Image (cartoon, grey):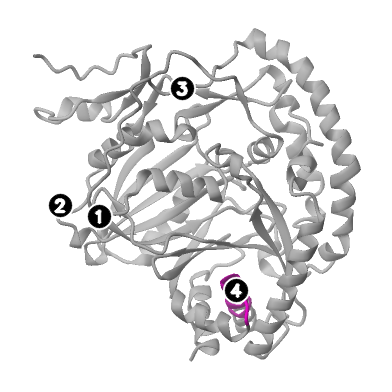
Amino acid sequence: MTTTHSTVLDRAGTTVRIRTPGEVFTTPAPTAPASTLIPHAPDSGPPRQLSHLDLHLLDSETATAPLHIGAVMLLDSAGAAGGPLAVTTLRRLFAARLHLIAPLRRRVRAVPLGLDEPYWEDCDTVDLGYHVRAARLPDGASDADLADYVARRHAQLLDRSRPLWECHLVSGLSGGRQAVYTKIHHAVIDGVSAAEVMAAILDVSETPTDTPPPATGVRRDRTPSLVEMVARSSGNAMARQSARARAVRHAVPALLHHRDEFRAKHPDVPFNGPLSASRSVAYTSLPLDAVKAVKRSIDGTVNDVVMALCTSALRSWMLDRELPATRPLLAAIPVSVRTPEQFGSAGNQFSLMLSRLPIDESDPRARLTMLHHNLVLAKERFRQQPPTLLHELTALLTPALHGLPTRALLRAAAPTLPLVNLIVSNVPGPQFPLYLDGIRVLASYPVSVLTELSGGLNITVMSYDGHLDFGILGCPDAVPDIGELTTHLGAALAELHP
């Protein structure tokens, strides 16, 4: 029986290319096929459009504000029974599970002239030779070297002609470790749906789980023709006008209710200048048990302590530079508003909560108590606003001309931006080890976004397997020594839990 390695498109399924054309010709006697096929179900789902919030995240992207979110997973490759991970193995893993992750098979299909929100189009071919890449740093590379590599890749825009994601397997790290850096556009996923993607790729044991496609095939969403898109746009325009009317009645008053909070933004911090096209990244881990001991001392939450640690680190960083720490910072905190029915649907279902970070308080214990009080008040204010606030506000924007009016509005508002000093986010994760093709994941550091609205510093934290993994993203022009924040985070925990 002859084995074929053809990548010719099969209309009965989605072709998933595993090896690049160069590898096909240079690899002697390949033992694995150059492509696989995800079978299609006989019926298709209705067309799927981007939501107002998804589209805003797509349209407001610029060269200085790429809007993808990501993570860096450190792998214990030196301790793996099968040795280090090869990029072809990683591609085969993605190919075997891509039927579980519809967002990684879709690309954006724009409506002519931006007459309507774009559609998600299921691709006939997904080229893992493009999406899953290998990089090798000099042997013995440090965590700082890895952070520099990730920062340079995180500054680059994703290719909108393809599904909006990339995955980089990085080798050469000290101790025989490897890293996997993944980035996915924020228009595709939020923090919760990012965790769903991670769950589909990782395993809970060293033995990879066999996950074959369903025998009936994978149901795809139907993509309308250009003529149908234009025809549908008139009805959708009327629905958009109704959504705008609702936003004026509900969301705008709620936003105005927060105007005094926006006035509390610290006026003089270096990370609130214009964004540059470069990025800097730093990461560190802290023990979760120590954080829990601190939270019990105030009858608070892990999130209270995380916010206090970030506040203390920022205070120390500013004092080191003789910057004014005489008034609080204003932080935006993403909060999931995803309902049980919306799990597994990807896209964005989040809102923002505002809280003051009391960097002006010199006593660490008093700072923690103030933070706990501030967050209680912030949660109460958040409960009073519509959970769909961001969806309703972004409905006021127009999809016309593929985001040109949105970007023009952001440029016009630039002198008054950002609205807050920074973003701080805490994402709960699994408290047990996960494995990538049998290799234990040592840590998972988030790498989030910087926006014109939220400023040039983002601290995102994920709890995983007994520790808190902090990922810090900034502009190097404004925060050239971002790694010092990780040192201050450790010192902040030591202050509260000696």
* Residue assigned mark 3: 219
Find the distance from the CA under tag 3 to the CA under tag 2: 35 Å
User: Which labelled disc corresponds to residue 82?
Assistant: 2
Which of the 4 image quadrants contains residue 370? bottom right
Residue type at mark 3 is Arg
The answer to whether 213 appears left or right of 226 in the picture is left
N-terminal label among 3 and 1: 3
Residue hosting label 4: 301
The answer to whether the residues at label 3 and label 2 have Cβ atoms under 8 Å apart is no
Does 17 sit above or below residue 452? Answer: above
In terms of secondary structure, where does tag 1 sit?
strand
| Residue 413 picture location, percent across and down | 81, 48
Q: Mark 1 = which residue?
A: 439
> Which label's residue is closer to the chain start, 4 or 3?
3
Answer whether residue 308 is visible to the viewer in this image: yes
Task: Say whether residue 211 is left or right of residue 199.
Answer: left
Position of the N terminus, as image quadrant, is top left
Question: At x 33% / y 56%, what residue is drawn?
Answer: 434
Image: magenta residue range: 299-313
